[in-house]
Image (cartoon, rainbow, N blue to C red):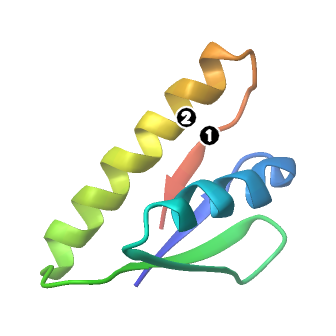
Amino acid sequence: MSQLRLSNPDYLEPLIEDLRRRGDVVVGAIDDDTIEVSMLGSYGLESMRLAIYLHIRAWEAVQRSQGHDVHVDLL
């Protein structure tokens, strides 16, 4: 599992919803600005972290394109 911390907790639920739409992700909030994410399937730890990282960076880019200022740190 990987933990992600958002710079703005207002975007926690939208990110959780986006990740759940994938169908191969288990995600849940563990704090006001932190979520825990795991991908289903045959992923090694580094492969899973890379897949999550790439999805999160794409999500951030969409948010920025809509004028939202949010950053996600992979802990």
Question: Under tag 1, what secondary structure?
Answer: loop
Question: Under tag 2, what secondary structure?
Answer: helix
Q: Is residue 32 above or below residue 73?
A: below
User: Viewed as shown, does residue 56 lie left or right of 66?
Assistant: left
User: Viewed as shown, does residue 37 lie left or right of 65?
Assistant: left
Depth check: 46 or 11 in front? 11
Rendered residue at 12%/81% (across/down): 44
Indicate which label's residue lies in the foreground, 1 or 2.
2
Rendered residue at 73%/52% (across/down): 14
Depth check: 38 or 74 in front? 38
User: Viewed as shown, does residue 3 lie left or right of 10?
Assistant: left
Residue with the mark numbered 2: 60
Instruction: Give the crowd class for mark 2: few <14, some 14-19, many >=20 residues within 10 Å.
Output: some
Instruction: Give the crowd class for mark 1: few <14, some 14-19, many >=20 residues within 10 Å.
Output: some
- Amino acid type, residue under disc 2 in the picture: Glu
**Can you give x and y, in whole percent of width and height, for residue 68 in the image?**
75, 25
The label number, if any, that marks residue 49 in the structure image: none
Rendered residue at 43%/39% (across/down): 57
The picture quadrant where one finds residue 30 is bottom right
Q: CA distance from mark 1 to mark 2?
A: 7 Å
Q: Is residue 8 above or below residue 74?
A: above
Residue with the mark numbered 1: 71
> In the rendered structure, are the residues bearing label 1 and label 2 in contact, judged by CB atoms less than 8 Å apart?
yes
